[in-house]
Amino acid sequence: MHIAQIRERLRQAGAAPVHERHLLQLWAQGPARTRQRDPENFLPRPLREILPQLQAELAELLTLRSAHGSEDGSERLLLALRDGQMIESVLLPREGLCVSTQVGCAVGCVFCMTGRGGLIRQLGSAEIVAQLVLARQRRSVNKVVFMGMGEPAHNLDAVLEAIELLGSSGGINHKKLVFSTVGDPRVFERLPQGRVKPALALSLHSTDAALRAQLLPRAPRMTPEELVACGEDYAQRTAYPIQYQWTLLEGINDGEAEFEGLVRLLKGRYAVLNLIPYNAIDALPYQRPSWERARAMARALHERGVLTKLRQSAGQDVDGGCGQLRARAAGLKKGGAVRTVENGL
């Protein structure tokens, strides 16, 4: 289901713009965050008559299958869609939420469990927003990052439709909507045109074009230099610094050559480099460097003029790397605080 379909059904039932805006706010933000109005006095009768059915359909978009709490304050959610497919969302510390945009992913990043299964289907824009709706029933959410399962650029229309709603009716500040991508020319064309312009996170992972192509085998063939140039242009147009994502893989992209490459590409840029030690997956051969090594690299980059933040991948103590919950859905591993939910919320 897409948000445009919801809007059309509301309009067919006689909704004026004020009714449509109110009902979408009520869905995306919840009753506790939205000023209630008496529907008998506010909504046209035909609109009141269709609301129970529409609300039931929206509630059925996602069902919570299991919740995995982590010591870092995050909570990974395994969600079932109406067709039986599953996706993941992550409630992050400090009122953040990481959402999925596809079932599976076509990019095939070699270190990612999601990419191993390929793309199964796109999420509708309403299914993307429904992840926020469900998350807000568990805790407050004031930031949404599009960094979960899937490549947002490969589902661009639906993702931009969701972003427009979240940045208006959803009550999320535009700078706290973060569009994450491996890089696609369409992103740099379309994002500046939107009424809601999200912050941008670019998955870099290597400054060596050949190595990056090996790590991200089906990403668009933009060189690291081209990616950074496009990112800098977007940063200047929106006045938001670009976030460059760098998953630290021991012995692969944590050496001196990559260090010097990062200084060359990012020194003096309107950007933040996020160093993220890899969240190890049993089925894959990659490992994360020690925290001490990662911290030393972040400190050295900062001293060389690259604003660098060392990030901890959420849910490492529950083996919660992207795609792992979905892959283990038939038989969850022990570990962490795990609750299985039998009847949704």
Image (spheres, grey):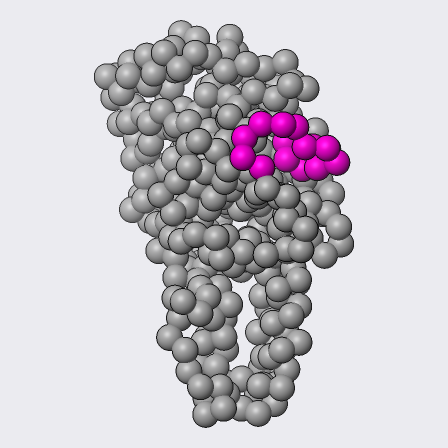
- Magenta span: predominant SS is loop
Q: Nearer the viewer, residue 12 or 189?
A: 12
Q: Is residue 148 above or below residue 18?
A: above
Q: Is residue 148 above or below residue 25?
A: above
Q: Residue 172 in the image: state x and y as whole percent.
A: 39, 57
Quadrant in which the N terminus appears = bottom right
- Using residue 119 as the reference point, say whether residue 290 is left or right of it: left
Q: Could you tell me if residue 192 is visible in this image? A: no
Q: Residue 188 in the image: state x and y as whole percent.
A: 47, 45
Q: Residue at x 33, y 31 (%)?
A: 272
Q: Nearer the viewer, residue 21 or 231?
A: 21
Q: Residue 310 in the image: state x and y as whole percent.
A: 36, 24
- Using residue 283 as the reference point, say whether residue 125 is left or right of it: left
Q: Residue at x 60, y 72 (%)?
A: 55
Q: Which residues are magenta?
A: 324-338
Residue 94, picture quadrant: top left
329 inside magenta stretch:
yes
Q: Nearer the viewer, residue 58 or 167?
A: 58
221 inside magenta stretch:
no
Q: Residue at x 37, y 37 (%)?
A: 242
Q: Residue at x 50, y 31 (%)?
A: 315
Q: Nearer the viewer, residue 144 or 158?
A: 144
Residue 35, picture quadrant: bottom left
Q: Residue 81 in the image: state x and y as whole percent.
A: 69, 53
- Using residue 290 as the reference point, say whether residue 219 is left or right of it: right
